[in-house]
Image: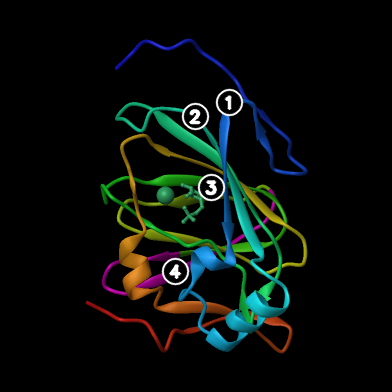
Amino acid sequence: MQLMEPFATYLDFKSGTLTPGTTVIQRRLSHMRGMYLDTAAYNRIMQEEGDRLIYEVYTVDLAEEAGQVLHCTTILYPGKVGDEFHMTKGHYHALRNRGEVYLGLEGQGYLLLQLEDGTVRSVPMQPGTAAYVPPYWAHRTVNVGDTPFIFFAAWPGDSGHDYGTIERMGFAKLMIERDGQPVLVENPRYRSG
Ligand code: M6P
Ligand code: ZN
């Protein structure tokens, strides 16, 4: 590994932007095709409103290698697709025995975690919540409020992102709005194994 100079980036707690020296990724509804349960709602939004911005990730530019500590902010915009709250794609780490730490900065959300046997856990997050993603758990966040849900994350540099497993199988549970409240329900489309 190359010896590096120490450096700092600036995190705006209110907006969630992390600058400079970061790469910004925008995830739009079309990037999540097939992930929301209500396909009719997905199609209606795409037709009537266009390709809605769901979330943005500001990642500090670092090599994805052992020894580094990657870190980023995520700004997850409020909204729903049908009854299902806006969420991130979610991923396992390619190296499964790598964990992650989240720190809530703004808004109200949930961290959903899942093992490969379909076991799901949820952790409510608000400003100040330091949530731990232990090794082996896939992780996805959900915005259940009506303002942006913003959090900071840090994880080992050699973790890697495995999106394919979640794209194929989904999460076993979904966070939907029922009678004005967020509730976790079984995902009828979840495929185990
Ligand atoms: C968190 C971290 C990032 C991740 C981001 C968005 O900030 O876990 O590594 O990229 O959430 O989630 P996803 O990559 O699953 O879309
Ligand atoms: Zn991760």
**Secondary element type, mark 4:** strand
Residue 67, how many percent across, how many down? 33, 26
Graded by Cα atoms within 10 Å as few (under 14), some (14 to 19) or many (20 or more), the crowding at tag 3 reads many
Quadrant of the rendered image containing residue 183: bottom right
Residue 124 inside the magenta-drawn segment: yes
Q: Secondary structure at mark 1?
A: loop
**Camera-side residue: 185 or 37?**
37
Q: Which residue is mark 4?
A: 121
Q: Are marks 3 and 1 in contact (CB under 8 Å)?
A: no
Query: Mark 1: is the Cβ under 8 angstroms from ligand 1?
Result: no
Mark nearest the camera among 3 and 1 is 1
The disc placed on residue 102 is 3
Q: Earlier in the sequence, mark 3 or mark 1?
A: 1
- Judging by the rendered image, the residue that carries numbered circle 2 is 61
Question: CB at mark 4 closer than 8 A to ligand 2?
Answer: no
Secondary element type, mark 3: strand
Is residue 173 or residue 43 the one in the foreground? 43
Compared to 145, does 185 lie above or below? below
> Where is residue 96 shown, x and y percent of the image?
27, 51
Three-letter amino acid code of the residue under disc 3: Tyr
Check the picture and name the quadrant holding the C terminus: bottom left
Q: Which residues are magenta?
A: 113-127
Task: Using the image as rendered, state which of residue 176 and residue 119 is in the foreground.
Answer: 176
The circle on residue 21 is 1
Q: Of the residues tagged 1 and 4, which is closer to the observer? A: 1
Mark 4, other Cα within 10 Å: few <14 / some 14–19 / many ≥20: some
- Look at the numbered discs 1 and 4 and tell me whether their residues touch, using CB distance below 8 Å: no
